[in-house]
């Protein structure tokens, strides 16, 4: 009997792609089989760390007396919902004709953990190899299988993944149980989610403590050109109106005299390729996509359409060995609006510079770019099309030359005061031609200065001016503005802040900042979107419009949580240690010994604290299950009532935000009520029953698909069944375990 190789992918869609390349045509509900290979799949994690209850009866009830929980021997359990698939994989591993295993899960720390725990739980002792690829095109899969790595090369990465999971379990579950029992309220915390919440609180305090101050400037109109006043330090504003008025009086009758005129050619390189965080931020700013939505859409473009490379990357560069593949990538994406530019670039000799290709700046995966897969734009949804457009245009842009402009700066005196005018004329579009058909292009790489004076570059023609010219002043006006507080976080700016938290925290420690920079900030590109969702679903923060606000519950939690868990320094220190474990420079056992000691101190601090927690969102509505008063909370998609008793778990939906537009003011309406009493309500006062809404939509030629309505209602009912206050399920779901 010929021996076969068992390939374990992380998701069914990836398994199907691999199976097609490996000619596995026999299909079953759990695997695909060919002459040489059997391809099966996980469903994300099939195996996980056991719940506290598995370590003894004393942990089945939540009590401060049983804390801290520090397992001497860790237990793994099969996740109940996916037990059937695990059993199928275990049976395949035990087949006599299976000689070796290939781990084809996602190329990263968590992907390593998914497969290794399955193999460990199944008692596998067969040889292991590793498939490590960044895209799931047929070409990438073939090349990956031609260069399989020994499984032992990734042993240290596996040890780091185990240490991450165990340390998050120990600290997160112990701290969550301690806080919940101490204050009899559903309070969860973690080494990533709590510092993220602390950043929002710090920004809120900064906004509340901000006092706006008026500032003034002067603008002179002469010769059809607008000149802005600047002081000796080059600032275009003053906080003293008297000074502005004095300058206006003294200079109003004089003429502007040109004292200096400089011209220079400015080269502007294209913005860098996208990593996941940069893409999530821009998608949020442009389209209002949440980080989680962006990641889900990107996963479809990667797994289903196969037109983009692996999305969970923190690199914005390519490696040198990818340069020969660029012409083919350009050729396949030369469709639709990209046809002309991509086609022209594919025929040129490409020599990307260090801003694009740099091996030293690529970690596990390179930047997000198009694959060599044939593209069918009409097979994409509107949302998929938008993200594909962002990635392709950025890819085309970095392969174009820099844009060029002629910048002119004119300095003039008016009396004894200095005024300046600037103009920029684009001479060579360069990379900007990739965006010629789009709306105004935004650069979101850095936060702008909200208080910057209005001394912007103008497109006026300054070429006719020369030194010594006198220009009669037609008007000299005082401009006025007010300083603004820092903007509240949006989901896009929050995910960027998680990547660079030192910029947003009051920290002067250089070692702290360096550690955060080296470890990529709070969380990873793969987990940040989930952390933000956990903070919303835990009602620790809420959205008002596009802005994120901390809730009273979140504010109180931060007062009760030990200081260590509120600082990004903790996760920075952990990630440095986990990185050392992955590189074989440290052992996971010594790391976990320190984590156990730290947890003991943490729990003692919580037990000894004298804080208190008060529900300030209590309603007079009684829980239909236990009779206690319910809490009104703003959920991710609307308002809900949840039972104050963390062990009850009852909740009811009050209203849900929808995409249905009000016929009066065209704003989005809320859906309230139950059953036949459901109605749409708008902030302008308009109300409309569901039946009337459907009839109106039908008359407008935008009939509501009944299947979509039914699916929507089923989704709402399903969400209503999901536990919110269930003691362990809720705490564990919100723990920082990724």
Image: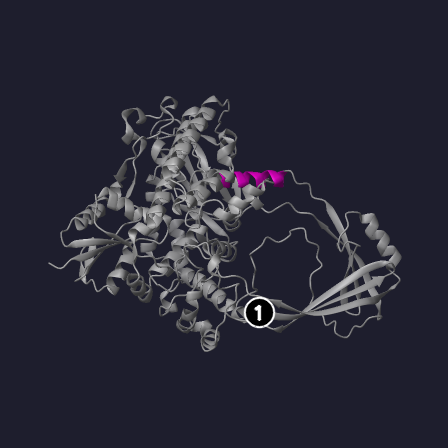
What percent of the width, then of the height, locates residue 241? 80, 48
Circle 1: element type: loop
Q: Residue furthest front?
A: 585
Is 562 above or below relative to 101? above
- What's the magenta region? 195-208
Q: Quadrant of the N terminus?
A: bottom left
Is residue 700 in sight in this rendering?
A: no
Q: Quadrant of residue 379?
A: bottom left
Is residue 65 in view? Answer: yes
201 drawn magenta:
yes
At which x and y percent is residue 409? 74, 66
**How are the residues colored?**
one colour
Crowd tier of the residue under label 1, counting other residues whose Cα lies within 10 Å: few below 14, some 14–19, many 20 or above: some
Please state the horizontal and vertical placement of residue 213, each as a whole percent of the image: 72, 44
> Is 18 included in the stretch rendered in magenta?
no
Q: Which residue is mark 1?
A: 402
């Amino acid at each position: 009997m010929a021996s076969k190789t068992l390939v374990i992918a992380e998701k069914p869609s990836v398994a199907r792609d691999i199976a097609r390349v490996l000619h596995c045509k026999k299909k079953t509900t759990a695997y695909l089989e060919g002459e040489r290979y059997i391809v099966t799949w996980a469903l994300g994690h099939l195996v996980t760390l056991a719940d506290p209850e598995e370590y003894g009866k004393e942990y089945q009830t939540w009590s401060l007396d049983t804390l801290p929980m520090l397992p001497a021997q860790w237990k793994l359990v099969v996740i109940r919902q996916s037990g059937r698939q695990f059993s199928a994989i275990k049976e395949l591993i035990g087949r006599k004709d299976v000689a070796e295993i290939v781990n084809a899960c996602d190329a990263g720390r968590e992907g390593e953990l998914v497969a290794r725990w399955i193999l460990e739980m199944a008692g596998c002792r067969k040889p292991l190899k590793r498939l490590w690829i960044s895209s799931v095109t047929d070409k990438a899969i073939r090349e990956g299988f031609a260069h399989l790595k020994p499984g032992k090369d990734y042993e240290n990465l596996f040890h780091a993944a185990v240490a991450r999971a165990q340390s998050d379990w120990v600290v997160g579950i112990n701290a969550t149980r301690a806080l919940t029992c101490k204050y009899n309220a559903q309070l969860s915390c973690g080494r990533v989610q709590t510092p993220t919440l602390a950043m929002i609180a710090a920004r809120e305090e900064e906004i509340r403590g901000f006092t706006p101050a008026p500032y003034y400037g002067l603008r002179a109109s002469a010769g059809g050109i607008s000149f802005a006043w600047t002081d000796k330090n080059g600032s275009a504003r003053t906080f003293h109106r008297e000074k502005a008025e004095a300058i206006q009086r003294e200079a109003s009758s004089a003429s502007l005299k040109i004292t200096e005129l400089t011209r220079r050619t400015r080269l502007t390189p294209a913005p860098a390729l996208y990593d996941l965080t940069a893409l999530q931020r821009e998608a949020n700013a442009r389209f209002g996509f949440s980080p989680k939505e962006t990641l889900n859409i990107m996963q479809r473009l990667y797994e289903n359409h196969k037109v983009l490379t692996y999305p969970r990357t923190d690199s914005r560069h390519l490696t040198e060995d990818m340069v020969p593949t660029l012409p083919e990538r350009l050729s396949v994406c030369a469709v639709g609006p990209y046809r002309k530019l991509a086609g022209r670039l594919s025929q040129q000799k490409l020599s990307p510079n260090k801003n694009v290709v740099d091996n030293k700046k690529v970690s596990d995966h390179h930047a997000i770019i198009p694959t060599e897969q044939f593209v069918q734009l009409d097979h994409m949804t509107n949302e998929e099309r938008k993200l594909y457009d962002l990635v392709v245009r950025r890819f085309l842009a970095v392969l174009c030359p820099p844009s060029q402009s002629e910048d002119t700066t004119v300095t003039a005196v008016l009396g004894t005061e200095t005024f300046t005018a600037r103009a920029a004329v684009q001479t060579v579009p360069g990379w900007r031609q990739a965006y010629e058909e789009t709306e105004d292009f935004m650069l979101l790489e850095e936060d702008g200065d909200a208080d910057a004076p209005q001394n912007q570059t103008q497109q006026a023609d300054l070429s006719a001016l020369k030194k010594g010219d006198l220009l009669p002043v037609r008007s000299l006006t005082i401009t006025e503005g007010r300083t603004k507080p820092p903007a509240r976080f949006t989901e896009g700016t929050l995910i960027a802040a998680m990547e660079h938290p030192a910029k947003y925290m009051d920290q002067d420690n250089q070692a702290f900042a360096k550690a955060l920079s080296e470890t990529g900030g709070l969380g990873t590109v793969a987990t940040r979107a989930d952390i933000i969702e956990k903070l919303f679903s835990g009602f620790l923060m809420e959205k008002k419009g596009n802005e994120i606000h901390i809730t009273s519950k979140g504010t109180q939690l931060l007062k009760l949580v030990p200081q260590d868990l509120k600082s990004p320094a903790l996760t920075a220190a952990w990630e440095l240690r986990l990185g050392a474990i992955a590189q074989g420079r440290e052992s996971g056992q010594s790391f976990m010994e320190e984590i156990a000691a730290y947890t003991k101190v943490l729990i003692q601090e919580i037990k000894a604290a004298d804080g208190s927690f008060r529900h300030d969102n209590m309603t007079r509505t009684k829980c239909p299950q236990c009779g206690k008063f319910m809490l009104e909370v703003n959920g991710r998609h609307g308002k809900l009532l949840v039972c104050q008793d963390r062990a009850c778990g009852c909740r009811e939906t009050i209203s849900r935000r929808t995409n249905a537009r009000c016929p009066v003011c065209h704003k989005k309406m809320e859906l309230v009520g139950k059953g036949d009493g459901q109605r749409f309500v708008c902030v302008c006062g308009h109300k409309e029953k569901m039946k009337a809404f459907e009839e109106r939509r039908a008359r407008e030629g935008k009939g509501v698909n009944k299947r979509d309505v039914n699916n929507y209602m089923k989704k709402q009912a399903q969400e209503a069944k999901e536990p919110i206050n269930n003691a362990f399920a809720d705490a564990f779901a919100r723990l920082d375990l990724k």
